[in-house]
Amino acid sequence: MSRLDAQLTTELDPTLRKSVAVGGTALVLCLAGAFADRQQFFLSYLTAFAFWLGVPLGCLGILMIHQLVGGTWGFVIQRALESSIKTFPVMALLFVPLLFGLPELFLWARPEAVAHDPLLQQKAAYLNVPAFVARAVLYFAVWIVLGSLLARWSKAQDRNGDPALTQRLQTLSGPGLILYGLTVTFSAIDWLMSLEPRWFSTIFGMIFMVSHGLAALSLIILVSCLLSRREPLASVMAPWVLNDLGNLLLAFVMLWAYLSFSQFLLVWMENLQHEIPWYLHRTNGGWGAVAAALIALQFALPFVLLLSRTVKRKAAALCAVALGIALMHQIEILWFVAPTFYPGGFSIHWTALPASIGVGGVWLSAFLSELKKRPMLPHGDPRFIAVVKEHGF
């Protein structure tokens, strides 16, 4: 690690200590809420966990895409992506508390409910606690292995500059994206769609793959822009690189809107009694205003702003757009989860904020700990060396 890298990572120490302290305190406060309302605690915790897990998941997908296609934009954010995917073991530990609240969250986890519902009995071969836990172990095992191999081989390339490691990373990323798609799809079905087990959608997993990518890219852009105030990132974070990142963010925004509207359109056209209630729960009362806000602030406004080259080429403007998208994604997760328990209208409990801050603080501390261990740029990658020679960084 160079002197500039060491100086930059040292400056991360205060943020790391604060994230540990704030995250731990918020989790304790949220846990205290479990004594007052056990179901609400697990609802808030699931919402927070689903949002923060989406960040390393989105980073994993983006990193594998970058390894396959290359591109200067990817080299600038590569270290942040690798640091994020190394947090999967921490997220696996944070998943464990949810296992103690399955009956509070999922109708299919209540034997008395299954005994009186023929539809739940038909789905019991898939929706049961042992199978749910086994699949969760499988999902995290796949994500941890993929993340560890990608980060380890990239780190080895920093030491020896072996071009063969580039081929190895690309060879892993192809099948890795297939495994990624399958695991993200089924985890979304297990942890979110099965909250209302009578409803299903074949697009649901795709929506979450794109949503995770949207949230991950937004937060990574924020982190990279903050780090680019110092060398070595300052010299490579050129306006045209920001423009490329903005274009990628725009693509995710458009794809999210397309998939979300496609799901709504198909449900509306089919008009089936087991599908319509899911949207009715999410448009009644204040939930309809939340849905409108998602359309306006996670699609329409970012879409218009990201069409502008001026916005995409200015770090402050791009960061503002990215921050807004990240915040709206958190609201989107709430919109997916909470109406199951409050179908009559908008409701949010005080434990939602400390749960999000707590899980986020723990994740951020793990992320910064990993970021401190690696140089900010992949100087051993032959593709990056070629980019440096071409553009004169």
Image (tube, helix red, strand yellow):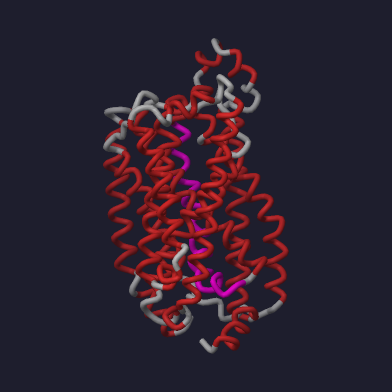
Q: Residue at x 54, y 45 (%)?
A: 208
Label tally: 0
Q: Which residues are magenta?
A: 71-100
Q: Residue at x 36, y 23 (%)?
A: 344
Q: Quadrant of residue 388?
A: bottom right
Q: In front here: 118 or 103?
A: 118
Q: Is residue 88 visible?
A: no
Q: In front here: 103 or 185?
A: 185
Left or right: 262, with 35 as reference point = right
List x then y, in percent, for residue 390: 60, 87
Left or right: 374, with 130 as reference point = left
Q: Residue at x 54, y 41 (%)?
A: 261
Q: Quadrant of residue 132?
A: top right
List x then y, in percent, for residue 26: 29, 47
- Does 79 lie within the magenta span? yes
Q: In front here: 306 or 326?
A: 306
In the rendered view, tell whether residue 134 sits above or below residue 392.
above
Q: Residue at x 45, y 28 (%)?
A: 105
**Residue that protrudes farthest toward the top in the picture:** 116
The prevailing secondary structure element of the residues shown in magenta is: helix
List x then y, in percent, for residue 270: 61, 26
List x then y, in percent, for residue 371: 45, 68
Q: Is residue 267 visible?
A: yes
Q: In front here: 112 or 315?
A: 315
In the rendered view, tell whether residue 144 sits above or below residue 110.
below
Q: Quadrant of residue 169?
A: bottom right
- Does 262 lie within the magenta span? no
